[in-house]
Amino acid sequence: MGSAGSGYLLLASIRAADGETLATFRRTASDGSEVIRAIDGLSQDIRERAGESLRSIRAGEPLEAVTTSSLEALRLYTEAVRARDLGELTRSRALLEESVRVDPDFAMGWRGLSLVLNDVGGEPQEIRDAATRAYEMRHRLTDRERYKAVAWYHDRVTGDIQQQIVAYQTLLDLYPDDETGLNNLATAYSELARWEDATALLERAIQGSGTSRSAYTNRVLYLSLSGDFGEARQALDELETRYPENELWRSWTGFILAWSEWDADEAERRATSLQRLDEAPNWRRTGTRALAFSYALTGQLSAAREVFEGARMEAVRQGAPIDAVQAWLEQAMVHPLFGLDPAPTVEAMLASGLLEEIPPQFRSNSQWIPFIAWTGFVDEARGLLDEWEEASMGLQNRQIQTARTLVDAYALAEDDPASAAAAIEGLRATSGCDRCNAWELGTLYERAGRTQDAIRERERSAAAGQNFYFGMHRMAAHEALGRLYEEVGDTAKAVEHYAVYVERLANGPDLPSVRDARLRLQALAGA
């Protein structure tokens, strides 16, 4: 390859065994971003001249447009991208590991490896190291690649959602149809529960040249969490038609939709499908916890507890303490749905010693620590915050500050719920996440006697999700709205919400909140 003015001239030839040149080929590229396309063209020219049929040539997948000094590394990377789209995560990981062995300076290979390690539940340090390798080589990349490497670094290493948004938006300003930019900016918006903004980007991707398997997958998730169940079902049908072989993503998105719209039978079916996956044990463990949630949907608390316990045992046996802690805390999250205290379950988790098995910087701190404080263990939460801050070495300051604000607010929850609510409203305003902490705010406003504010937040929880636990918050919101509307004298609405709650949890008639809601419903209906 040589320079030709401001562009490039690529030359190739076919030679006989004796060195005689049998054919020569040339392609030009106007700039660096066109080089890969020119190489694809040369490859087709050579293969066609060498006797391969034109039909098979044109049916071949083009190489990915990423920067590497090795065609072999590029071929491996391209094959790995295809394998990931098919849900073949083990194969994708192996191909990417080989690609960076062939070219250790292959920045996008390192980024891709970090992505797949994240998919399969790899070691957190390996995920961060691979993301960091790509980030450290960012100045050698094209603009298109550089912003992807920067954004993923902030996703996996610093946890700075605002920096992710800036990087992906800059990428899309330069390349409006970039499939990574469209999908990953949507993912960043989803972290702020901006489901409509995220879905709009994915629709743009699917309707244009930026389409991808991730766009089809995430569209189902975000439509489900926005409460647009009809559109979500249609999006799931489209995903399953377009990617029928990808059982992992079909099962996961199908579960989230079923869980969010309270289809317990379908949620159980999809959770079981996740449990049976050959790929990625972390997804099989996710399937076990999903099965527990599907039982909770109809009030089968004993069955849900048994499955959560099984999930913990499975995770410990497989050396996955992060998933074991997650199972403890998700069981605790279910308890308020039935009017039960989550504190004993959180206390048991803290006493288990599992947290000590996880390096502080690799815990799911931004989720776990505020919830631990919310259930009353404020001192323990502050201790975990301090460990996180010390171990992060300044990389996750924004996340740490957000968690600290929430912990400080929850410390006020019992004695001064109005001040706690004000602190969370302030965090909402600065983060741009209008739906975040809707469930907690509704509870705080109830405690503060601010009924109309509580109704507003409970209606929010019933309409759309603040996170992936939408199905649970949505159901609990109906019980709370029954009480709140009864308090303000709106009997019709109180009856409506009590009825939804009691009907859905028919398999848990003796659970405290279900029993009380049934009694109130009977009293109001007979009045």
Image: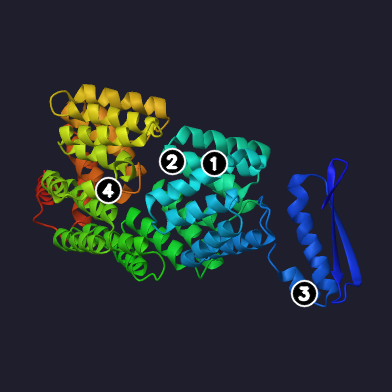
Q: Residue at x 30, y 33 (%)?
A: 390
Amino acid type of the residue that numbered disc 2 sits on in the rendered structure: Val
| Residue underneath mark 1 | 135
Q: Are marks 2 and 3 in contact (CB under 8 Å)?
A: no
Is residue 298 at all visible to an observer of this figure? yes
Q: Is residue 460 above or below residue 83?
A: above
Q: Amino acid at mark 3?
A: Arg
Q: Is residue 42 above or below residue 188?
A: below
Q: Are marks 2 and 4 in contact (CB under 8 Å)?
A: no
Decide which of tag 1 and tag 3 comes sooner along the chain.
3
As helix, strand or loop, the secondary structure at mark 3 comes to helix
- Circle 1 residues within 10 Å: few <14, some 14–19, many ≥20: many
User: Residue 358: which numbered mark, if any?
Assistant: 4
Label 2, on which residue? 157
Q: Are marks 2 and 1 in contact (CB under 8 Å)?
A: yes
Give me the C-alpha separation between circle 3 and circle 4. Answer: 53 Å
Residue at 13% x, 29% y: name it.
414
The tag earlier along the polypeptide, 2 or 1, is 1
Question: Is label 4 in a helix, a strand or a loop?
Answer: loop
Within 10 angstroms of label 2, few (less than 14), some, or many (20 or more) residues?
many
412 and 156: which is toward the camera: 156
Going from the N terminus, do you reach mark 3 or mark 4 first?
Answer: 3
Q: Are marks 4 and 1 in contact (CB under 8 Å)?
A: no
Mark 2 or 3, which is nearer the eye? 2
Q: Is residue 500 visible?
A: no
Q: Position of residue 485 (x, y in %)?
A: 21, 36
Q: Which mark is residue 55?
A: 3
Tag 1 or tag 4, which sits nearer the N-term?
1
The kind of residue tagged 4 is Ile
Q: Residue 362 at what x, y percent from top left?
A: 33, 45
